[in-house]
Amino acid sequence: MLRALRSTRNTSIRGTVAGFALAVALAGGVAMGSTAFTSDAVYAQENSRGFVEAYQPLAEMVNGEAPNYEAARSGLTGLYQAIENENDRQVAGNLTLIVGNNLSDPTLQRRGLEMMLESGLVAPEQLGQFNYFVGSLAYQAEDYAAARTALQAAQAAGHTDPETDLTLLIADTYAREGQIQESLNYLMQAASDAEAAGNTPTERWLLTGLQRSYDNELTDEAVSVSEALLRNYPTQTNWVNTLQVINALNEFDPAARVDLYRLMRKADALTQRAEYVRYVEDLDPRVMSNEVLTVLASGMQNDVFTADDEYYVEVKGIADTRAPQDRSGIDSIVSEGESGDSLDAMSAGDVLYSLGNFARAESLYRMALDKGADANLANTRIGIAQVEQGNYAAAVETFGMVDGTRSPIARMWSAYANSMM
């Protein structure tokens, strides 16, 4: 039933309306349930005489035992032309919404809601819900810019919905317009704001950002999202996802890739046979035999290799032959590193690392740096050696010195060190 209107000349329209109900299914299966709204404070306002005269016949069409909503829809244009003040606009919007609801016409539903909002007469406590429904209807209509504006207004008004994450939905409006960078920026700003307020950002925001970074090959953004994800949710699954994304999006040289695989092993994020094989090949069982044996043992423990695996048997045979030579000849190797050039010092540090002598390896890496070794390589490995010793704060500082192509690896190692503090 329609509510009674009172004109400025005391022309009345009989009837009452308690409110409206609206249900809209969003893409992706998110649903809005029916919610009733009332505007009793508005009902006491006065309407213009011309509007009341235009409204009367439409009210009669929708009231009574056999309402004719189709006929009422045909008369809405004339009703709009009779609007003289904001109370007229509020009532016209309410009627439009009721007709739209009964005809299951989302265009009319949206128009009715928008008119009511434009009137400025919606109760403050209902602004969030009204804007949310407008945004949902606009989203359904693929009018993503309008959806975004309304949903942001709903969010600003404090609207929440247990089945809908407004931040994700707003970010999705950017993505559906092809504005992937803007979508990511929105998600990351939301996460940053949450952290600044002392709250934990929603994991789905960050996982969505990681997926979009990967899908669109945004390498820098992938690292930033990964850092935020691991800072707040350092689960084994997230270590697997982030490190696989970083590995997939970057073309690392073998030496750099080894350092990424070392982190994957450290974080229990090596899950695929191809990763183990690439790790072994990049190390070279003839050079870093002791670390290769460690990797093979990890693969066996994680059921990646079996004892009769041809690749495993072949590589282990090579490493088993070479490994004792490195162990027994380590003093000579270190002596050559100390007296030789930067490459000799780096090689000695690598062998020490493979033997698990991380403190001494750090010393040789620093010596290599002093002798002119590539600073990004040396600092990466100094930082890794520090992590292995549990010197996490020092490692974070060291990784902060790494830039260039190794920067993503250093930043992920830094994320690991931070997670351990």
Image (cartoon, grey):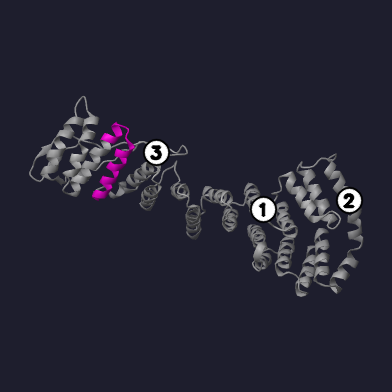
Q: Name the residue under label 2.
A: 318
Above or below, 309 against 337 in this view is: above
Which quadrant of the rendered structure holds the N terminus?
top left
Q: Name the residue under label 3.
A: 32
Which quadrant of the rendered structure holds the C terminus?
bottom right
Label 2 and label 1: CA atoms lie apart by: 27 Å
Task: Classify residue 49 as left or right of residue 175.
Answer: left
Location of residue 410 in the rendering, given as x and y in whole percent from the top left corner: 66, 62
Q: Tell which of 146 and 323 is nearer to you.
A: 146
Q: Are marks 3 and 2 in contact (CB under 8 Å)?
A: no
- Name the amino acid, label 1: Asn
Q: Name the residue under label 1.
A: 247
Label 3 and label 2: CA atoms lie apart by: 63 Å
The residue at 58%/58% (across/down) is 220
Above or below, 293 against 26 in this view is: below
The residue at 56%/52% (across/down) is 213
Which region of the structure is painted magenta?
99-120
Q: Is residue 100 magenta?
A: yes
Q: Residues within 10 Å of mark 1 (few under 14, many from 20)?
A: some
Task: Classify residue 231 as left or right of residue 162.
Answer: right
Location of residue 222 in the rendering, given as x and y in whole percent from the top left corner: 58, 55
- Name the amino acid, label 3: Met
Location of residue 322 in the rendering, given as x and y in whole percent from the top left corner: 90, 55
- Name the amino acid, label 2: Ile
Furthest toward the left, the residue is 9
